[in-house]
Image (cartoon, grey):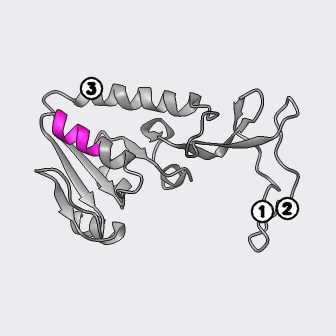
Amino acid sequence: MLLDLCKEKDHFVVTSNVDGQFQKAGFSEDKVYEIHGRIHTFQCTNCNAVWQPDLEGFGVDPNTLEFTSEMPKCDCGSLARPNIMMFGDYGYNSEISSKQEDKFNDFMHKHDKGNKIVIIEIGAGTAIPSIRHMGEFISEKVDGATLVRINPREAFGPEGTISVEKGGVEGLKEIL
């Protein structure tokens, strides 16, 4: 529904989700900024290399949470980890998310003067407020920017926020 809403408009997705669902839904890789990284990319625990692994045959038993294959390793022989930022994680390699951030900043600079910007924020809570802070910052600093916050329990926002107290699907249906 979100893709249908914005595909005819210049848009950008900023997400704290690490699961790649926006790309799976059809959003262009070049228009997604994953601020906390991506679980489908690995990084080395030793040399910090980042790569897209071949996940064929790789898995975890959902009942025991044990690997059903060998633990992923880097070419240097060290164990790999998902390229996602954990809490207090100083070993996170931000190479990919930094490039995504640069593309997002270019997008914002292109549109920050004389354009109407609509920020549709879905389900961002106050416990980990990175997405909320970004939407509020843009809505307060960019002339013509409007924040639409869809959240069943925490839809409140700064003055001018359009608060939709519903879940994501219900809120998007209301917008559509």
Q: Which mark is residue 60?
A: 1
Q: CA distance from mark 1 to mark 2?
A: 5 Å
Residue with the most extreme bottom position: 63
- Comparing labels 1 and 3, the label whose residue is closer to the camera: 1
Residue extent of the magenta highlight: 135-141
The N terminus is located in which quarter?
A: bottom left
**Position of residue 152 measured from the top left corner of the image (x, y, whole percent):** 30, 70
**Position of residue 57 measured from the top left corner of the image (x, y, whole percent):** 83, 56
Residue for point 60% across, 34% down:
90
Q: Which mark is residue 44?
A: none
Which element carries disc 3, helix, strand or loop? Answer: helix
The C terminus is located in which quarter?
A: bottom left
Q: Amino acid at mark 2?
A: Thr
Which element carries disc 2, helix, strand or loop? Answer: loop
Q: CA distance from mark 1 to mark 3?
A: 43 Å
Residue for point 72% across, 43% down:
81
Q: Which residue is mark 2?
A: 68
Q: Which residue is mark 3?
A: 110
Looking at this view, is 146 or 158 the one in front? 158
First of labels 1, 2 by sequence position: 1
- Comparing labels 2 and 3, the label whose residue is closer to the camera: 2
Q: Main secondary structure of the magenta part?
A: helix
Q: Quadrant of residue 59?
A: bottom right
First of labels 2, 3 by sequence position: 2
Q: Is residue 84 above or below residue 65?
A: above
Q: Is residue 32 above or below residue 153?
A: above
